[in-house]
Amino acid sequence: MLLNDLTQALGRLNLAKVAPGEYHKSGCHLEVEAAPAQMPEVARVMLEQGCFLESLTAVDFPEHFTLVYHFNHFRELCRTVVHARVPKEAAAPTISHIYPGANWYEREVYDLFGLTFAGHPDLRRILLPFEADFHPLRKKFAPSETPADA
Amino acid sequence: MLERGLEEKYYVLNLGPQHPSTHGVLRVELQMEGEFIVKADPDIGYGHRGHEHMAENRTYLQFLPNLGRVDYLHALAYNQCYCMAVEKLLELKVPERAEFIRVITCELNRIASHLLWIGAYLLDLGAFTPFLYCFDDRENILDLLDRVTGSRLTYCYYRFGGVPRDVDDDFLAGCKAFARRLRSRYRDYENLVNKNVIFLERTKGIGIITPEQCVQYGLTGPMVRGSGIPYDIRKCEPYSVYPLFDFEIPVGSTGDVYDRYMVRYREMEQSLRIIEQAVDRIPAGPIMAEKVPKRIKPAPGEVYVAVEAARGEFGIFLVSQGETAPYRLKLRVPSFGNLSILPEIAVDTLVADLVAILGSIDVVVPEIDR
């Protein structure tokens, strides 16, 4: 079973948390917490198991950013959510060399949150204009601060 | 002056932002050697409206109409996903009749989306007639949905806990009549399109996507099913009342543009089967859950909910901190992931083929830009 395989394979990586999730509540079968530096290893394990990257996003908390990765599998339903806390102003390593699809997701997180990914081949803005000087999904961002309104 | 990443020896061509084949404001910066593409770089974001930011700044209910404007072609699936996410946080149970109504209307909307795609896609390839047939059929769906939802395109019909207005017998009879009508048109579509030599020549063997690439790029929907992987959330992660119905997941074999066309074409028949079964078996009863709170204020928690939209997996990742607005709401849109493979499959193709490939991805640009 995929859930067991994933638990075992991730268990070897010395992560902060690898535990079954409450699927009926959170929609995830496996919950994982990792340090940002461990993400390439985690991604490599997920790819070996045939999982695809379903979504990658961030949440802006007062003390830190949390990167949230969702992985799923085409043949067997097993959604894995990985949380990685990134201190403000720190960079997280990219996983775009493992999952090429992460390239755009990481650009989006950079664009909206200003969180940088070390080793990303092409970290440009993706949704906002290239010359924008703000990151709209940061909690301290207020829409009235945008240059357009000034 | 050359922008970054552009090489002087190549001819640079901007496809878009106002190009008929991009179906919205999308620019693809092409570097070409002769007529062959060396590098393709999609530039998105022209229609960025900040939906995710808006979600954090209004109540749960106030955000509901936004969902119909993320992907305006399959708006009801997006309505449904958001309602499901909030219902999951609130632990609301939707009455069965409401679930049936959701499934019927959502599948009608899916057929409308596929019909529009087929018409517009063939227009890209230079065939004008099928477009008129598709829009003629699609008009019937719009009239049906107009009756129950009150709008023709940007639907906002589902509510947390059910649907606000019941459907009548005329609507249900109309669904059956539409199924008969669309089936009677298959012969026309097959003669006009599926057996058309020009169409086959232009779509077979180009834009091939392997199953490995599907995993690497996280493709979903007809993109992944065209490559032979039967990944459809309605079957793989059943939601609503889909498990009650008998339907199949059409898949392709080679993963080329033609396979993706055939997957969408055959999906319409499966949606019709679902609609007919649902119309036959729709139970009587309430259409709204009891005890839906007036003020939506879910307990703190995180939830990820996914539905199968016409273009692939639409997911919502919602973080609640017990406030009247979400703390974070991420819209995982299928076209974003699906388009991100374009730079890889566009290399070494002709510009004319790129139009066929880009169209086969079935992008809805406002959905990518959010």
Image: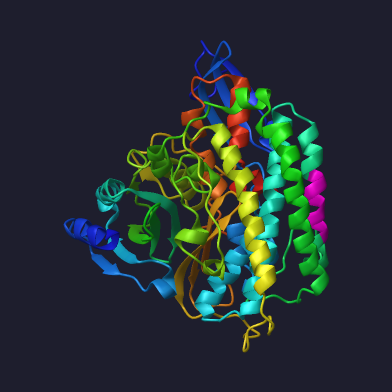
Q: Residue at x 79, y 67 (%)?
A: B173
User: Is B219 on the left or on the right of B112, as rendered?
Assistant: left
Q: Residue B292's x, y, as percent? A: 62, 85
Residue B139 counted in the magenta span:
yes
**The quadrant where residue A28 appears:** bottom left
Examine the rendering and report whether any part of residue B242 can be seen. yes
Q: Residue at x 42, y 74 (%)?
A: A24
User: Is A77 on the left or on the right of B113, as rendered?
Assistant: left
Residue A31 counted in the magenta span:
no
Q: Is B225 situated above or below A36?
A: above
The mark total stands at 0
Predominant secondary structure, magenta span: helix
Q: Over which residues does the magenta segment extend?
A: B135-143
Toward the bottom, the furthest residue is B291
Q: Residue A112's x, y, as percent? A: 52, 51
Q: Is B48 situated above or below B150?
A: above
Q: Nearer the viewer, residue A74 or A142?
A: A74
Examine the rendering and report whether any part of residue A143 can be seen. no
Q: Residue B233's x, y, as percent? A: 50, 58
**The quadrant where residue A141 appears:** bottom right
Q: Residue B60's x, y, as percent? A: 62, 72
Q: Residue at x 66, y 79 (%)?
A: B283
